Amino acid sequence: MRLIGMLDSPYVRRVAISARLLGLPFEHEAVSVFRHYDTFAAINPVVKAPTLVTDDGVVLMDSGLILEHLERLAGRSLGPADLADHARAQRILGLALAASEKTVSLVYEFNLRPEDKQHGPWVERVRGQLAEAWRLLEAEVAAPPPGFEGSQAWLTCAVVWTFAIRTLAGSIDAETCPALAALAERAEATPAFLATPFD
């Protein structure tokens, strides 16, 4: 399998770490949707990261759909089996992905749009949504469901936290999220994370 995209993308990185935790071999190709547009388009004309090319040559995109395929391929899930625990894990995962989406929105707004074209009310709305995502996520991970450590929700929280701290530090107050900060620190020290560095 080939995983296409840069590891500074939380979506690419969560797929790469998941594949490692599932014991699935893959080749990572660090192709940027910005700097290597034509190269990426030759693999996936939609130019969406992550892109996964299966052993059979099928081109998949969207991290959630790719992860569903990888879990089927591995024959096991990175989520809890118990229905109630699964619901809690899915809530945590949803909050982490919301934090990721809002952080990406702000990164694009500040890094790609000229300052005189930025819409202040929209930026403040996104900042508010992001702050709520972090607040709710902190409360969830402070008392996580059984089997949380090593799960998809757990690794996505860590990946998104590292992404936010590294790309938009002003969007987050680490002192108000000690459980998230500690979770990310532990995760980043594990073999799967160390083998899949942010940079």
Image: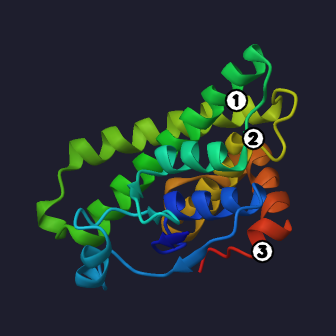
> Which is nearer the eye, 125 or 94?
94
- Residue at 12% across, 61% down: 117
Left or right of 161 in this view: 11 = left
User: Mark 1 to mark 3: distance in Å?
Assistant: 24 Å
Label 1, label 2: how far apart the Cα atoms are = 16 Å
Proximity of marks 1 and 3: CB atoms separated by less than 8 Å: no
* Front residue of 106 and 152: 152
Q: Which residue is mark 1?
A: 89
Q: Earlier in the sequence, mark 1 or mark 3?
A: 1
Crowdedness near tag 2: few (<14), some (14–19) or many (≥20) residues, C-alpha within 10 Å: few
Crowd class of label 3 (few under 14; some 14 to 19; many from 20; radius 10 Å): few
Q: Please report the residue visible at 35 percent of the width from the left and 56 percent of the height from the top.
A: 106
Image coordinates of residue 89 in percent, x first then y, are: 70, 29
| Corner quadrant of residue 107 | bottom left
Figure disc tally: 3
Name the residue beneath numbered marker 3: 194
Compared to residue 87, the image places residue 55 above or below, namely below
Q: Amino acid at mark 3?
A: Leu
Query: Is label 2 or label 3 in front?
Result: 2
Going from the N terminus, do you reach mark 1 or mark 2 first? Answer: 2
Q: Position of residue 49 (x, y in %)?
A: 39, 64
For badge 1, the amino acid type reads Ala
When asked about the image quadrant of residue 40, the answer is bottom left
Task: Indicate the amino acid at tag 2.
Answer: Arg
User: Which residue is at a point 68% across and 56% down the rendered structure image?
Assistant: 18
